[in-house]
Image (spheres, helix red, strand yellow):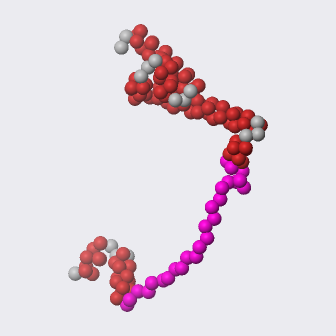
């Protein structure tokens, strides 16, 4: 590749990473800097350092979106939005979580073995304590 193409690609990668920090959606970031998703994934596959930077940018962008969402939620709570209030309480206070109570009875019956079954179990346990050669000798 020529230096001019390398330089352009490097600049596009930087722009893409910055865009992902603001909007952590690959399709939107690619559209914004005018590259295809195929190009994006090819770059990730061929350049581990770039792929790592992308993962970090998406994480950072996700945190930004979460901060924005929480800010909107706080505004909605301040405005008296009952749905927002209920959501906050259910996700932050265990006493407001929805609960499901199940009750019932379990009846357990122990099965007794026949004398033949008991004998087979004893033999199986005896064999399990032997090494392979000893088992072969007992079976002969």
Identify the image quadrant of the C terminus: bottom left
Tell me if 136 is positioned left or right of 10 in this view. Answer: left
Residue at position x 50%, y 82% from top? Answer: 109
> Looking at the image, which is closer to me, 118 or 54?
54
> What is the quadrant of residue 114 in the picture?
bottom left
Residue 74 x, y percent position in the rendering: 73, 37
Q: Residue furthest left?
A: 140
> Looking at the image, which is closer to me, 129 or 94?
94
Tell me if 124 is positioned left or right of 17 in this view. Answer: left
Q: Which residue lies furthest to the top in this view?
A: 4
Residue at position x 59%, y 73% from top? Answer: 104
Span shown in magenta: 90-115
Residue at position x 36%, y 75% from top? Answer: 128
Provide the major secondary structure of the magenta segment. Answer: loop
- 12 to 75, vertically: above or below: above
- 130 to 42, vertically: above or below: below
Residue 118 x, y percent position in the rendering: 38, 86
Q: Is residue 43 visible?
A: no
Residue at position x 73%, y 43% from top? Answer: 82
Residue 57 x, y percent position in the rendering: 55, 28
């Amino acid at each position: 590749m020529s230096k001019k193409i390398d330089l352009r690609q490097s600049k596009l990668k930087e722009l893409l990473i910055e865009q992902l920090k603001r909007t952590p959606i690959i399709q939107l970031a690619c559209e914004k800097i005018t590259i295809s998703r195929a190009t994006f994934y090819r770059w990730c596959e061929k350049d581990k350092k770039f792929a790592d930077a992308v993962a970090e940018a998406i994480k950072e962008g996700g945190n930004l979106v979460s901060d924005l969402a929480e800010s909107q939620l706080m505004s909605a709570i301040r405005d008296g939005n009952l749905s927002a209030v209920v959501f906050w309480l259910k996700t932050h206070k265990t006493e407001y979580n929805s609960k499901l109570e199940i009750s019932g009875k379990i009846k357990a019956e122990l099965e007794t073995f026949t004398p033949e079954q008991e004998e087979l179990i004893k033999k199986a346990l005896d064999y399990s304590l032997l090494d392979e050669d000893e088992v072969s000798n007992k079976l002969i």
